[in-house]
Image (cartoon, rainbow, N blue to C red):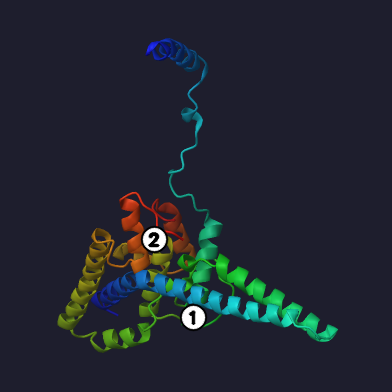
Amino acid sequence: MFRSVFRAAPSLTRVSGLRSGFVKPTFSSASRFYASSSLSKEEITTRIADVIKSFDKTASATSITANTQFSKDLGLDSLDTVELLVSIEEEFDIEFPDKVADELKSVGETVEYIASSPEAN
Amino acid sequence: MSELTLSTYKSLLRSLVRSAKHNKIQQLQQDTKKQIALLTYNRIQLVRQQQEKGLDAMARSKVLKQLSAVGKKIEILKTKDPLKSKELLFYSHSKHLKDIVLSLKDDPRSLQHLKDIAAFVVNQSEYEQLIERYNPGLKMSQEEKVQKTANKVGLQVPE
């Protein structure tokens, strides 16, 4: 009754033995996707520009470049800047530490910081 | 502007934006669903008009144009992702909040109180999320509940 099972078993092991001899481990060549910050600077800039455009307190709708200053070019006071930074934090799912947030005065600096932080996405 | 004022405003805004996010997403999803339903109804009406007899060529082409426009709108709505909406990033009554914070800027006690409120909002929303996660039945529709109960005992609800 069990003969067929017993007979099948050694042939199975033989097959699997063969296979392990031939197949090379492929996982070593697979790329690692969790490397630090996959965002390019252009992408970050465009996303920040989108956020700024949908922020209704900005003074002018001029094109936003890395040199755009929050207070001078966008006409934001310090509280509005804080609000904008909170929105940018939410967009990239990160949190600026208070010390860093005080230093961020322009789009370029913000882009730099986001590009250097690994958790941003 | 003093440091405390800024950090208070920041933590308040952050907490409000974060805690509102979940509900906003759901609301946006419902809104798009409603719009899609309305447009689908419009489309059905147009198709009916089109099938009517005794329609001259002009009217027929007009109906066809409207049909394609409605179809395009539906497609756009279906591809729209509410998670990507920029609306989620802002707190809609920030002006009011700003006025409050500015009026209290010389009063560190009140500012501290506002900060505590922010912390409370964060913790409360976290608590709600946990309640929801540990009691998945709370937000299920009756239909869904019946379906899942049936699946649990190896049955299927007839369609």
Q: Is residue B17 left or right of residue A108?
A: left
Q: Position of residue A13 (x, y in %)?
A: 43, 13
The one nearer the camera, B97 or A107, is B97
Q: Position of residue A93 (x, y in %)?
A: 39, 60
Task: Identify which residue is drawn at 43% across, 44% down.
Answer: A34
Q: Quadrant of the N terminus of chain A?
A: top left
Q: Which residue is mark 1?
A: A58
Q: Is residue B8 left or right of residue B62?
A: left
In which quarter of the view is residue B49 placed?
bottom right
Tag on residue B91?
A: none
Q: Quadrant of the C terminus of chain A?
A: bottom left
Work out which residue is located at the far front of the displayed protein and give it: A1
Task: Identify which residue is drawn at 35% across, 79% down.
Answer: A79
In which quarter of the view is residue B118 placed?
bottom left
Compared to residue B99, the image places residue B18 above or below, namely above
Q: Which residue is mark 2?
A: A93
Three-letter code for the amino acid on which mark 1 is drawn: Thr
Task: Identify which residue is drawn at 28% across, 75% down.
Answer: B12
Work out which residue is located at the far left of the displayed protein and give it: B109
Compared to residue B156, the image places residue A53 above or below, namely below
Measured in 3D between alpha carbons, the distance from the residue under mark 2 to the one under mark 1, in whole angstroms, is 22 Å
Three-letter code for the amino acid on which mark 2 is drawn: Asp
Residue B157 seen by the camera: yes
The one nearer the camera, B96 or B159, is B159
**Which chain letter goes with mark 1?**
A
